[in-house]
Image (cartoon, grey):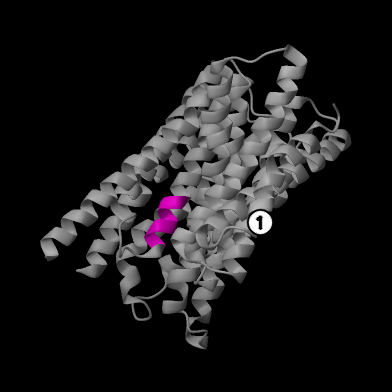
Amino acid sequence: MERIGYIVFICFALPFMLGIPIVRGKARMILLFIFVGMCCCLFISEINGLINNAVGKDLYYLTTNITPLTEELIKALPVLLFSIFVSSERQMLLTIAFMTGLGFALLENSTILVQTVILQGSVDILWALIRTLGAGLLHSLCTTSVGVGISFIRDQKKFFLCGSFALLFQAIVYHSVYNSLIQSDYKYYGAAMPMVTYLVIIVILAVVFIQKGERKAKAK
Amino acid sequence: MLNHDIELICNGLLCLGALTGFVYSLVRFFKPRKALYLKMVGCALGCMFIERLYGFVQYLVVGDLTQSFQIGTFGTIGCYLFILSANYGAIDSLMDDGSAEIRKYRLAALAAPLVMLAAAIVILFSPSLPGRKITCVIEELFVGASAYYSLKHLIISRKYADFLTELKLFHLISLLLAAGTTVENLMWCYQVKVQALWYIPYAILLTAMLTLAPFLYKGVRKWNA
């Protein structure tokens, strides 16, 4: 029971790792960063456990003030390193940032699912929807926002340091707002928060796509 | 401090104000070929919105902002980091080549961080909890750094940076934002009992949040013209 995180990691993350040498190109990058996200999740669960023991505050305080900080930091790290050492191309950073968040959410959701089933006997579809569209999407969105932001500022040294931290802080506070709402009487608003953000982003992307198409048509 | 309901409404209003500024900057600044400087200011408003949303949610859920460390501080720091990196990264190098002629403006601009530093020292001696004091002092350091560039760009002569003339109002509002945050921090740490005084920083912040992006847009349009 104590090592459930490791068992879930072996069951879900190892298949991704085994696929990395087989596939090629962008698919390899996708598998790799889903795996990296899962590793981040496993690592940070241990760190959060240690902080929990050291700080000794209640669960609400920890989940609204400590875990958003540690989780967003650890998820942003691979994205930051990738942008420094490999590529700062926007589409690439967007993909790997989203995949890191996805991998993180995948392992977190799987672990919580197994734990909840063991403790409560069963879960329902509403629970699954809230976990997926809430926390699952939240992790991907927060990491993506950092990744996309870094792609804008990576090549400009004067912006890079301050900008990276500012983006990270934005993600941390957003994560904390979600954690506060999801544990309160307003949990459905909390669950809807990442979904609303996601929809807004999709609408913006659609508008940009349409405008681009119109401009191309005019140019022709 | 204000009573719970008024505090909740004030934070809600500030949240809406920052959201309005953020949406305005999304529409105006986040377009292809727009300067990164504008996008950074937009992100600063986004940070401010998330920070105020955090405050609003805490009042709604817990009933009070925790007296020790609270993570919403990162929103404030993020906001000023965005303004700082926008001013330092994009504009400062265009007007300050490190020459001795500009030294007087550099020195005069130090007045802003010195005021923030003084505020930080006053906060350290306040009767507030150590966690709260440290958070406010850290905030003040970033507010001071951002205010330095805002003041420098506000006071510099037209001779050195002609383009900055159109952005003076924007820099003035940036300073107003910094002043609002400082006054709010001071009042938090001293737990000011006179309720009417609490409306001062909130009014300053709301005005700054609503006007920051439109004045920047107006300034940039004049500059381009």
Point out residue A43 in the picture as x, y percentages from the top left corner.
77, 46
- In the displayed orientation, state which residue is furthest to the front: A22
Residue A182, placed above or below residue B84: above
Few, some or many C-alpha atoms within 10 Å of disc 1 (few <14, some 14-19, many ≥20)? some
Q: Is residue B203 visible?
A: yes
Is B127 colored magenta in this rendering? no
Residue A42, placed above or below residue A87: above
- In the displayed orientation, state which residue is furthest to the top: A121
Point out residue A33 in the picture as x, y percentages from the top left corner.
61, 53
Point out residue B71 in the picture as x, y percentages from the top left corner.
65, 39
Residue A9, placed above or below residue B219: above
Q: Is residue B112 visible?
A: no
Residue under the point 50% across and 54% down:
A95
Is B38 colored magenta in this rendering? yes
Q: Quadrant of the N terminus of chain B?
A: top right
**Which is more toward the observer, B143 or B198?**
B143
Q: For the residue labelled by badge 1, is the local secondary structure a helix, a strand or a loop? A: helix
> What secondary structure do most residues of the magenta stretch adopt?
helix
Residue highlighted by disc 1: A77
Q: Quadrant of the C terminus of chain B?
A: bottom left
Q: Chain of mark 1?
A: A
**Which is more toward the observer, B142 or A187?**
A187
Residue under the point 26% across and 46% down:
A207
Point out residue B194 in the picture as x, y percentages from the top left corner.
58, 26
Q: How many marks?
A: 1
Amino acid carrying mark 1 in the image? Leu
Residue under the point 58% across and 19% down:
A127
The part of the image, by quadrant, that contains residue B162 is bottom left
The part of the image, by quadrant, that contains residue B208 is top left
* Magenta span of residues: B37-43
